[in-house]
Amino acid sequence: MSNYIISCGGTGGHLSPGIALAEGLAERGHTSTLLISHKRVDARLIEKYPHLRFVPIPGAPFTCAPVGLFRFIVSQTKGLFVSIKLVQQVRPSCIVGFGGFTTASIIIAGKLRGVPIALHEANRVPGRAIRTLTRFAKRVYLPPGVDLPGTTKDVIRNTGLPVRREITRISREEACMKLGMDPALKVLAIFGGSQGATVLNEWARRELPQLASAGIQLYCVTGLGKGVAEVMKLTASDSSKITAVFSPFCDQVAVLLSAADLVIGRAGAGSIAELIRCETPAILLPYPHAADDHQRANAKWFEQQGAGLVIDQNEMVELSREVFALLRDDARLDSIRRHLHRLDHSATLQFILDDLATFTSLSSV
């Protein structure tokens, strides 16, 4: 049995694959300690996984603004001391980092103690943490077709994002019933990532009368702190009853994506991996302020694969037009689903687990 430390806090896009890896390791008889942030979204997401060990670690995003930079330096220094102590306690056989501001301190602490390091980057543009820490890693997992200048080929493995085992498509009828939706009517889901997207929430409120009139049900995940839970009943033009749900958080992602005929969402790598796994057509609006504009690169690749559409956040009129057009075009939706099926790399987790075993020392630090 080996012990692993997995750094994966800060966003659902980091935490979800960390959980997937920890569960995969557990199935092989290994133990894991998952490092998360103190953010509310992390605390909410881990509620479903009492069988896993989570440890909050100090950390703050990097910024050049004086106050933010000071907070970053202080929090990362605290995080380093916590990490050094944790490495001494856990004595891990390997440390795996999924990027983000919780990663740097534990990777440095591990390197100081001679622990093998693995890094995973799911975005088509590697983030600052991964670019900076690659020099310490024995392995770097990158998306297919993505390279990292200055990193030797023997270190890089091209693979997808490990998806939690619970993210698997179920029948649309079953999913609709679980969400209180009518399976006979179309379902549009708004899913702006683990923290929600205000611009998408506002669009959903604005377009709700038109959606209901057209007989389209709505399930909008607003994000924590961006609205209260609400279920609305409206009437379509043909007098049928339409359900609209606004929920701050969704811990039934597979159910929601299985019920949805179409998703409007951001373009984080985690969201895209879940859309692919559940074969759910989507219109993506990349977050325009994402670091290195990585969401735009993710979305461009997604569209090029025929897996969905990409619309700029400033083109909300076009979004409305495309939503109604797509939901009326079953043949086009079926074509998108076939492309999504082609993209599914369900063996990603097993590949990473097998590869980690090839270089992870079974001896304790």
Image (cartoon, rainbow, N blue to C red):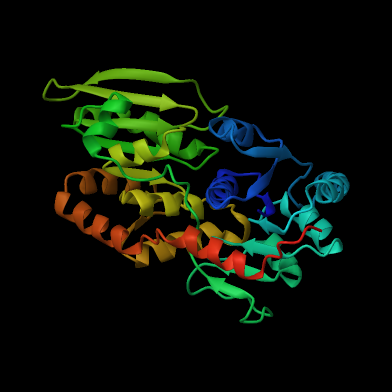
User: In the rendered view, does 275 fall on the left or right side of 42?
Assistant: left
User: In the rendered view, does 60 fall on the left or right side of 223?
Assistant: right
Residue 159: percent from left, percent from top: 50, 67
Residue extending farthest left = 238
Residue at image location 59% in from the left, 52% down from the top:
289
Residue 203, placed above or below residue 364? above
Residue 319: percent from left, percent from top: 34, 47
Residue 337 visible in this rendered orientation of the protein: yes
Residue 293: percent from left, percent from top: 57, 60
Residue 69: percent from left, percent from top: 83, 50
Q: Nearer the viewer, residue 138 or 221?
A: 138
Q: Quadrant of the C terminus?
A: bottom right
Q: Nearer the viewer, residue 269 or 360?
A: 360
Q: Nearer the viewer, residue 365 or 198?
A: 365
User: In the rendered view, does 54 fall on the left or right side of 197?
Assistant: right
Q: How many discs mark residues in the rendered view?
A: 0
Residue 8 visible in this rendered orientation of the protein: no
Quarter-of-image position of residue 121: bottom right
Residue at image location 42% in from the left, 66% down from the top:
301
Quarter-of-image position of residue 181: top left
Residue 132, placed above or below residue 187? below
Residue at image location 69% in from the left, 45% down from the top:
33
